Image: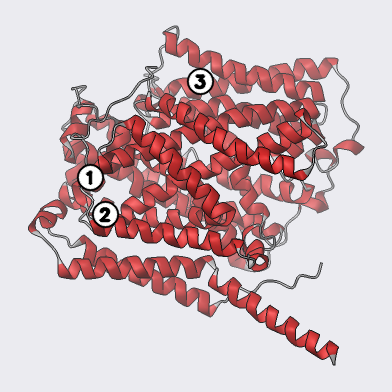
Amino acid sequence: MSDIQQGASDQQSEKRERRLAELFDIRTVIGALFAIYGIVCLITGIADFSTADQAKSDGININLWSGIGMVIVAALFIVWSIAKPFRPPETHD
Amino acid sequence: MEIGFPALEGSVLRINAAPIDYVLVAIYFAIIIGIGLISRRGVSSSLDFLLAGRRLPAWVTGLAFMSANLGATELLGQAANGAQYGEQAFHYYWVGAIPAMVFLGLVMMPFYYGSKVRSVPEFLHRRFNRTTQRIQAVLFAVASILLAGVNLYAMAIVVNALLGWPTWVAILVAAVFVLAYTFLGGLSAAIYNEVLQFFVIVAAMIPVTIVGLHRVGGWNGLVSKISAQPGGHQLLTPFPGSQLTGITSSVGSIIGVVAGLGFVTSFGYWTTNFTEVQRAFSAGDAGAAQRTPLIAAIPKALVALVIIIPGMIATVLIPAVSGLKKGAAAGGITYNDVVPLMLRELLPNGFLGVALTGLLASFMAGMAANVSSFNTVFTYDIWQDWIKPNMPDAHYLNVGRIVTVLATAAAVGTAFIAAGFNNIMDYIQTLFSFFNVPLFAVFILGLFWKRMTGTAGWTSLITGTAGAVVVFILNQVGVLNLPGQGSSFLGGAVACVLVVIVALIVSARTKPKSDEELVGLVRSVTPKADTTVAVKVWYQSPILLAAVSLGLVIFFYIFFSLR
């Protein structure tokens, strides 16, 4: 009985480990950061493209386009991390 | 060299950041420090694996490798080079980095990985002797503090541009900020930060390059406007690079670029810079370790475009920088200010925050790396191993904490030295010639020549370093007269020659180690089987990866020379 319990808790901690590893996967972190930055810039670009900014950038809406770009990059990283999840290798030596 | 405040008066360079920019900066540091704090609260096992991680796939170590190299000092310094030397600055990447990275991957990595050499101090101890290891530890400690000062000064440039504080206040505040970040976030924050800052910087520089080019009328517009400047046409071709080397003869200058920058400085940097090489060691197997620098070389070849070209654009777009070209008083502006000036010139609030985040994050990463490597070397190699051995662990932990504070304080001092240079890349190259080049020469000799003795190790290291310092001093006092970065190239070359000469003379008079002692340390006595790497899939072929990055370099050189 205790062996079975032991096995179950091992499995649980293994599951927890794996979820943490996936959460802290650098691709997930990059994806999350660029998603936030992309959305903020995108909204700023749509809401506010002042004449001063237009003069600075020769009429290119930098916030809008870089926002779109960063959202795409974020999506790529997140898709990558889901498609090829990061598995901690077995710890036996 | 004039040490003082290159006073950027508040009004000269002010970036008008809005609340939204500060919010974006704050989000970034909240994420980084959050990761650091969570990792402390007992969920460490999986994190340990990720961070210190052995058995990592090549794409992770490749990311870490290239991120560790592109810091903000490189961004500011190379953009400054782009403004000052134009297309000649491309040599830093295409001669100065890619061939050495390929060499590291193809030749050195299999050997490192197979021979179980895991750090420079360890190698020096086992290959030579304790004295060599300790001398290197002291030299390395000094170098770390000097480089930490460069990062701190660079960070102060940005704080100054944001808030208009005088340089010395900005340096002090930046130091306190870095210290708080180091203690709060710890190692894990530092490592995530290092990778993230790379992506943020690249994300920021691509629009700066594109919009900047658009403003000056595209690439052709840039070319015609630069050639209209005095001496401009020389900056529009990478070779012979006379402004960069300070050598007027074309042939001499090309030799200077290839020998000084290509072989001496950059091979010295890439093959012995263990902060970066260490990233490759955490790879899963010898093949992944070998691919790490080869994978990193490809983005490295490309990233030159979005760093050097904005520097060139600045000379056309920003009157203060073109004034600098003509030797006019630029109101306290130096080439180091090119990046903040470009951000102010082009970016709207919002995206400006992203760019500022990239800059601030990478100074933090650079400075934290310098301080922590100083800490490690001082606490373990100097204090524990040498000055005060056999104390309880708590003692060394305390020493480590105190050293972190002292190192930061010392970096404030060295930041003012960095502030005395008009172009921080000149300064960084000088430091490389003092510290990296002699070490590289000793390292390579030790690796390939089994007759070299322990005494030869430390005597040649000291002589080489002294030689580079003497060249620097001679150039400062005017005995030599090399402008640009010629003095550090010459210093590096002199250091190399001295190391070889001293090693030959001293080895001839002292007793070498036996072959058995040198297995795994010297190439000729290490079994071939230990250093052979198997390739499983065609796209993992090291030769293919090397060919891609070298092919890019050749393509770019042809493009920029023939245009």
Say which residue label 2 marks. B352
Chain of the residue where label 2 is placed in the rendered structure? B
Q: Secondary structure at mark 1?
A: loop
Furthest residue to the top? B479
Looking at marks 1 and 3 on the same chain, the residue that comes earlier in the sequence is marked by 1
Q: Name the residue located 28 percent from the left edge and 30 percent from the top edge.
A: B334
User: Which mark is in front, 1 or 3?
Assistant: 1
Looking at marks 2 and 3 on the same chain, the residue that comes earlier in the sequence is marked by 2
Query: Any mark on residue B15, and which?
Result: 1
* x and y percentages locating residue B51 in the rendered image: 62, 59
Side of B27 relative to B196 (left or right):
left
Q: Please state which of residues B430 and A63 is positioned toward the viewer in this rendering.
A: A63
Name the residue type under label 3.
Leu
Side of B278 relative to B8 (left or right):
right
Q: Quarter holding the C terminus of chain B?
A: top left
Chain of the residue where label 1 is placed in the rendered structure? B
- The residue carrying pointer 1 sits among few (fewer than 14), some (14 to 19) or many (20 or more) residues within 10 Å by Cα, namely many
- Tell me whether marks 2 and 3 sit on the same chain: yes
Furthest residue to the left? A51
Structural distance between the alpha carbons of marks 1 and 3: 38 Å
Q: Name the residue located 23 percent from the left edge and 51 percent from the top edge.
A: B17
Say which residue label 3 marks. B490
Chain of the residue where label 3 is placed in the rendered structure? B
Q: Secondary structure at mark 2?
A: helix
Kindly check if marks 2 and 1 are in contact, taking CB atoms under 8 A apart as contact.
Answer: yes
Q: Name the residue located 81 percent from the left edge and 25 percent from the top edge.
A: B454
Name the residue type under label 1.
Ile
Structural distance between the alpha carbons of marks 2 and 1: 9 Å
